[in-house]
Amino acid sequence: MQQHKTVAVVGTGLIGRAWAAIFARAGWDVRLTDPHGPTLEAAPGLVRDELRALARHGLADDPDGAAARLTIALSLQAAVADADFVQENGPELIEEKLAIFAELDRFAPKDTLLVSSTSAITASRFTEKLAGRARCLVGHPVNPPHLVPLVELCGAPWTAPEAIERARAVYREIGQVPVTIKREIDGFALNRLQGALLAEAFRLVGEGYISAEDLDHTVKDGLGLRWSFLGPFETIELNAPGGIPDYCARYTGFYRELASAPADPAVYQSPNVDQVIAAWPHQATPERIATLTKRRNERLAVLAAHKKTISKTIP
């Protein structure tokens, strides 16, 4: 019988628990560790609940069997001992990353990949002085990772190309969609794209061109529908008879004008941010956030199930 591979999930907050569900669903043994005792104790039950929710949409087989592959490790050293892969999900603080990766590099087997879920800290900032720095990289997921499969892989200048390729293979194996950022850049790709749209959204609402709710409709009932299965280059390829070259010839003059006056950083400061906040007609109560999070996850699960089904029938 083939032995299961083992992943150490370091940090069992929202992202860590999602990674645990993803790896367990794919047949891996999962060791969970977290320095906060109550968070670690609650994690297996919460992961099991998420696996059951995935199963209701056809996105996980045998959720209880997958949950049985979860174990708790009371120390980081115990978690990474003989692990085949490490997914770190600690706080977004450089000091924390430095400390955690120093321990990971010390205790994990020498050929084990050490991957951080960080969304904001490039790998070079917390791996430079490590003896095993060539095996360290970022594997930045999209929240919630168990429903949105993209993972951005970005190494430091000293990360071995072989480490990136091994990580890509692991993420493909567990059902995620890895993309490679070829060299370090703040925000990687996803957050830079999201940031460009968000800055323009803050400008348009803050300066009174459109209401906050109508702005959201513009994305979720307009651009977002195409973006759920087409990227920006695929989109423009279909928006001109001659594809991308034709689109560039026809329309980039307009976009050059827009790019010449991008949204200013001041859109995230007073008074503009105050205008945006005032334009949003809802209060962020705990009840509202919980309800919307549940609704988001249910809708993403339905969309993921649809894309899974349609990919088998439409190339």
Image (cartoon, rainbow, N blue to C red):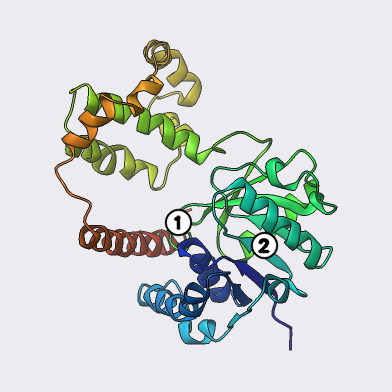
In which quarter of the view is residue 2 placed?
bottom right
- At x 68%, y 37%, the residue is 182
Label 1 is placed on what type of residue?
Answer: Val
As drawn, the residue found furthest toward the bottom would be 1
- At x 74%, y 69%, the residue is 84
* 134 vs 218, nearest the viewer: 134
In the image: residue 309, left or right of residue 211:
right
Q: Residues within 10 Å of mark 1 (few under 14, many from 20)?
A: some
Disc 1, SS: loop
- Which mark is drawn over residue 148? 1
* 168 vs 141, nearest the viewer: 141
N-terminal label among 1 and 2: 1
Label 2 is placed on what type of residue?
Answer: Val
Q: In the figure, 13 relative to 126: above or below?
A: below
Residue 315 in the image: state x and y as whole percent. Answer: 48, 53
The Cα–Cα distance between marks 1 and 2, rounded to whole angstroms, is: 16 Å
- At x 36%, y 72%, the residue is 57
Residue 216 in the image: state x and y as whole percent. Answer: 24, 40
Circles 1 and 2, Cβ within 8 Å, touching? The answer is no
Disc 2, SS: helix
Q: In the figure, 147 relative to 209: above or below?
A: below
In the image: residue 5, left or right of residue 200:
right
Residue identifier under label 2: 170
In which quarter of the view is residue 261 placed?
top left
